[in-house]
Amino acid sequence: MLSLDEAVQRLLAGARGHAITERDEVSTFDALQRVLAQDVRSSLSVPPEDNSEMDGYALRVADVPAEGTVLPISQRIAAGQVGRPLQPGTAARIFTGAQVPLGADAVVMQELCEAIAPVRDGELGGVRLRTVPSAGMAIRRRGEDVQQGAVVLCAGTRMTPQAMGMAASVGAATLQVWRRPRVALFSTGDELAMPGEPLKPGAIYNSNRFTLRGLLQAAGCVTVDLGIVPDRLDATRDALRRAAAEADLVLTCGGVSVGEEDHLKPALQAEGRLDLWSVAIKPGKPLAFGAVRSGGSGEALYIGLPGNPVSSTVTFLLAVMPVLRVLSGTSPHGPRAVPMTAGFDWPRPVKRREFLRARVAADGTLELFPNQGSGVLTSMVWADGLIDNPPAHAIQRGDVVPFLPLPLLLQ
Ligand code: AMP
Ligand code: MG
């Protein structure tokens, strides 16, 4: 049996030459999940000039020697306006986000001031300060977020909502991104029916098709869904050929064991090449890797996942995601475990490295789903993540265990 780490190393070695090299230019509006092909550098400082953090009064600290000082108001500056240089011995009424006038070195928020009404029409009145301000108070400095010329987003970044805002804040209207990986997907199994169809005796609904489509979408891929392929060699070979013609990666689930009804092995041997691995993890175990010829000298990568719903999901997260990161152009990283306290006992561990479905309980410890079977999809819906438990390792309540939150596995 192969360890998971060895399996992932081999997958990555196989995927390395397959990183997407075509770029798209997309509107920053449409960049969610896309991977940057180029650094985003800022041609301006953010904020572009010093501006006020509060609604209040801009003034010179030197003009306010003591609490109770009264200053006349010489101008009013709202956000989007640029005021005149501040006349010494006066204050400017200023609002959040407005540029601080030249000569002012502090803003006092209005909660610490008393407005003095104007005596005559057309005058601006005055302000009594109930504090002695210090220099820089309530001023957001030019460039305190971004310095002109700085790289604000690195090539290889997958665009999050925050990253989209960041790009917009430096004025980037379009972005250079890598083309999304195209992944052809099919499920194998004569027992599989689609939701909406009546369930014949002996049949089950095809849940993996939905889970895997969702996972691929969450990972930023374009899915070419070839549906359900019957358990026959000719049909399997045909599906592989169609898949490879359209995709960078062909992903299948089921049929990768070596039972008489498992046709992927001979089909791949005919249409490309294949390594069949037994990976020492639970759930998971069978995993197939190889390539399918796609006309000319081209080939699509191939990964075959086990059929059991929890196994295929977990194997996708642990073994397919690293490959998708390479194809997508994101910098690869291993699973990032968070140390968490077990709120349960796990006295009879198996000899394989086990990924236990767990969630964070109200007291902050981890609780375990009672049925850890590889077909129990309920456990994956219930769980917040997976505990990465080493082979033959018993867990006692109170032990610190490595926890892999599901959202981190999908990054
Ligand atoms: P296999 O790897 O084809 O031997 O399948 C292993 C188990 O997973 C069997 O119980 C299958 O019925 C089940 N299975 C295979 N494919 C799917 C699927 N797409 N959706 C739900 N269960 C599946
Ligand atoms: Mg099958």
Image (cartoon, grey):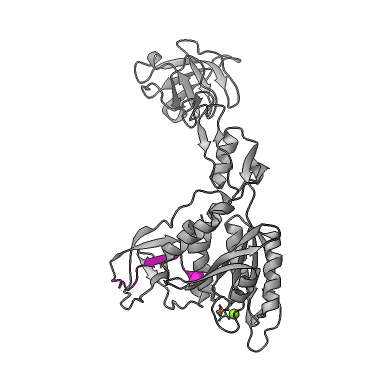
Tell me residue 362's x, y (percent): 38, 64
Tell me residue 62's x, y (percent): 38, 14
Q: Residue at image x 36%, y 62%?
A: 402
Tell me residue 397's x, y (percent): 29, 70
Q: Residue at image x 64%, y 83%?
A: 191
Residue furthest to the top in view is 88
The quadrant of the rendering that contains the N terminus is bottom left
Tell me residue 404's x, y (percent): 42, 61
Vertical order, 112 against 202 (above or below)? above
Q: Report whether residue 388 is seen.
A: yes
Vertical order, 332 against 355 (above or below)? above
Q: Residue at image x 50%, y 23%?
A: 50
Residue furthest to the bottom in view is 201
Vertical order, 160 against 128 (above or below)? below
The answer to which quarter of the image holds residue 272 is: bottom right
Q: Report whether residue 194 is seen.
A: no
Highlighted magenta segment, given as a residue range: 380-396
Q: Residue at image x 35%, y 64%?
A: 365
The answer to which quarter of the image holds residue 168 is: top right
Q: Nearer the viewer, residue 82 or 390?
A: 390
Magenta stretch contains residue 270: no
Horizontal side of 159 relative to 354 (left or right) equals right
